Amino acid sequence: MPQKSISAAFLSIIAYINNVHFCTSGGRMNNHIHWYPGHIAKAERLLKEKLNLVDVVLEVLDARIPASSSYGNTEALFKNKPRIILLNKCDLSDPSENSKWQKKIEEKTGAVCLLTTNAGAKDTNLIINKIIEISKPVIDKMVQKGLLPRPARVMVAGMPNVGKSSTINRLIKKSKTKIGAKAGVTRQQQWVRVHEKIELLDTPGIIPMKQENQEAALKLAFVNSIGENAYDNEYAAVELLKILGAKYEQNLRDYYNLKDYDITIENIALARNWIVKEGKPDITRCAQFILTNFREGKIGKFTLDEC
C-alpha cells in the first residue's frame, strides 16, 4: 500500500518536529543540534492524546542505534501500557549485535523485543501474533468488568524515520477495512481492522527528540532521523567516519579503496577524483555521498551504539 495510506496529519507533525536550527556564534556553525522546546511540548501533548486511545504500543527503534533512537524514560512516557519494541532495520545493522541488543532491551524494559526490517512483509504475522498475545490480559480485564470484548487498539510510536510508517502500511495490507473515527479522535485519525482481534491507528505517534546528548543527536543525524537543516553534513560525515573507523575499519578501507591511506573525507574524494577549485577535494559532495552510503547499507551492516 502506498504511503498515502497514512493520514496527512502525520506530515504536519513531522514538519514542526524537524523545524530545527543551528546554534551560531559569529556567523559560524558550532555543530550543536537544537530542537525548539515549544515543538517538543506540542509533540508530547499529541502523543499523550493518542496514548489515551490505545491498549498496546508498538515502539519502533532503529537497530543501528538502539539506545540513541530510544526516548530514554519511556516508562513515564507510556505510563506502563503494554508495549512491544520493534528493533527495526535489523537488515542494516550488525548481525552479531542484533541478538545482544534484543536481549538487553528485554531485560531493561520488561517488554517483548522483535527484530524487524522494512523489506517485505515477512515480519507481519510475527507482529500480529505478538500483539494478540500481549493484549489478551487487557481485553480479559475488560470482560471481567462486564464489558463486551473488542479488538485491541494499537498505535505505532517512535522517533522520525525509524520505520513507523512502513510498519503501519505493512500491517494495513492485511486488511483495507477502515472502521472510522473513535470517540475523542480527530477526523484525520482513522482505525483500520488489521485482524479480527486488532484495530490499528493509521497515524503514528511521534516521540519527540527531547535530549541534550549530542553524541546521540549525531547518531540520529547519521540515520536521517533529524531534519537536514539541523546539522552540517561535512561535520556529520567526519564524525561518522570516526565511529566506523574505530569499529569497522576494514569495511571502510575495502569499500572506499583506501588501502594505505587515512580514512578521511578528503582521501575518499580524491580516490574518486572529485576535485574542485585549485585541485582541492570536493568535500561537500563527498560528505553527502558517505552519509547516503551508510544509510543505504552499502558500506556494510553496522551498529553504532555499544551494547
Image (tube, rainbow, N blue to C red):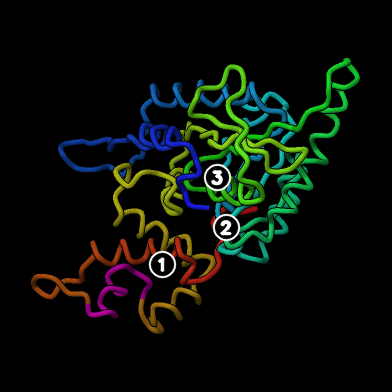
On the image, the x and y values in percent for residue 266 come to 27, 70
Residue for badge 1: 293
> Residue beneath label 3, please?
164
Residue ID at (53%, 36%): 203
| Kind of element beneath mark 1 | helix
- Give SS at disc 3: helix
Q: Amino acid at mark 3?
A: Lys
Q: Residue at x 61, y 18 (%)?
A: 183
Q: Which residues are magenta?
A: 262-273
Give the crowd class for mark 1: few <14, some 14-19, many >=20 residues within 10 Å: some
Residue identifier under label 2: 118
Looking at the image, the residue that sits furthest to the left is 278
Q: Give whichever of discs 2 and 3 has the lower sequence position.
A: 2
Closer to the camera, 155 or 299? Answer: 155
Categorize mark 3 by other alpha carbons within 10 Å: few (<14), some (14-19), many (20+).
Answer: many
Tag 2 secondary structure: loop
Q: Is residue 86 magenta?
A: no
Query: Observer-nearest residue: 208 or 202?
Result: 202
**Tags 2 and 3 touching, CB below 8 Å:** no
- In front: mark 3 or mark 1? 3
Examine the rendered structure and indicate whether residue 214 appears above or below residue 241: above
